Image: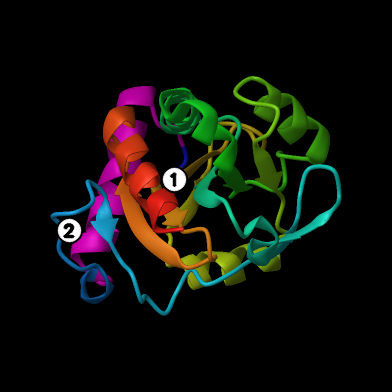
């Protein structure tokens, strides 16, 4: 594909790619939606177990350091026109809905575009949403590995110039409980009120 995809088709591709991923080749690892949670309950899954990646300050981050907090992990890129900023804005709304418990929710953004999403760019991007959000920057070698671990899809779509490419990617959020176990798979478009309800239930378990 040699042309930059227009915003509407690109968004459709992002969501369609995520849906196809869940319904097709990886359908076996997605249980049915839980009656208890609004998100898909994937408790006991043998993927999305951990990460070990530098953040936008250069500090190495692992999932275990966030014990005691619910962690929301989302993959994207800073030049994403709609899905990524919408998801991060909605996570900010979730924190607001949680009130004092909002400080117990850690949002982690993992870039699928390390070539352009250098630390300074990511730091500025995170500040647009919440200064406590973390952006992780895998190397070109680490990105396929972490994508495989989380079973997410990403693909570079070339544009008219070498720097005008876009990234297709799975538009989903992984939610970890306070013990660092992956518990929920939240598809793009879930209302902040529903996600806040899920986070409260995980916090109550603690």
Look at the image and say whether residue 6 sits in the magenta stretch.
yes
Q: Earlier in the sequence, mark 1 or mark 2?
A: 2
Residue on which the image places disc 1? 168
Q: Nearer the viewer, residue 70 or 205?
A: 205
Image-based side of 158 in relation to 21, left or right: right
Image-based side of 174 in relation to 19, left or right: right
Q: Nearer the viewer, residue 200 or 18?
A: 200
Residue 9 visible in rendering: no
Which residue corresponds to the image point at 43% horizontal and 60% vertical from the top-left?
152
| In the rendered image, the vertical position of residue 194 relative to residue 81, given as above or below | below
Q: Position of residue 13 (x, y in %)?
A: 31, 41
**In the image, which disc is placed on residue 34?**
2
| In the rendered image, the vertical position of residue 136 relative to residue 30, given as above or below | above
Q: Position of residue 131 (x, y in %)?
A: 70, 27
Q: CA distance from mark 1 to mark 2?
A: 28 Å
What is the span of residues highlighted in magenta in the rendered image? 3-26
Q: Secondary structure at mark 2?
A: loop
Which residue corresponds to the image point at 54% horizontal and 65% vertical from the top-left?
180
Q: Nearer the viewer, residue 14 or 198?
A: 198
| In the rendered image, the vertical position of residue 63 relative to residue 116, given as above or below | below
Q: Position of residue 186 (x, y in %)?
A: 33, 48
| In the rendered image, the vertical position of residue 37 relative to residue 193, given as above or below | below
Q: Residue furthest bottom?
A: 46
- Which of label 1 and label 2 is nearer to you? 2
Colour approach in the figure:
rainbow
The number of discs equals: 2
Q: Nearer the viewer, residue 195 or 172?
A: 195
Look at the image and say whether residue 54 sits in the magenta stretch.
no
């Amino acid at each position: 594909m040699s042309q930059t995809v227009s915003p509407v088709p690109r968004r459709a591709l992002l969501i369609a790619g995520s849906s196809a991923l869940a319904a097709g080749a990886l359908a076996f690892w997605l249980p049915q939606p839980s009656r208890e949670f609004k998100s898909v309950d994937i408790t006991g899954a043998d993927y999305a177990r951990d990460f070990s990646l530098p953040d936008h300050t250069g500090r190495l981050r692992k999932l275990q350091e966030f014990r005691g907090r619910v962690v929301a992990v989302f993959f994207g890129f800073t030049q994403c026109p709609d899905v990524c900023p919408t998801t991060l804005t909605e996570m900010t709304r979730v924190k607001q809905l949680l009130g004092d418990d909002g400080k117990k929710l850690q949002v982690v953004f993992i870039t699928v575009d390390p070539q352009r999403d250098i630390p300074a760019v990511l730091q500025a991007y995170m500040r647009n949403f919440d200064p406590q959000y973390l952006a992780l920057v895998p190397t070109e070698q680490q990105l396929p590995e972490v994508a495989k671990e989380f079973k997410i899809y990403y693909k570079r779509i070339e544009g008219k110039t070498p720097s005008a490419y876009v990234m297709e990617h799975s538009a989903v959020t992984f939610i970890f409980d306070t013990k660092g176990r992956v518990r929920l798979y939240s598809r793009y478009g879930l209302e902040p009120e529903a996600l806040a309800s899920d986070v409260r239930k995980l916090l109550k378990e603690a």
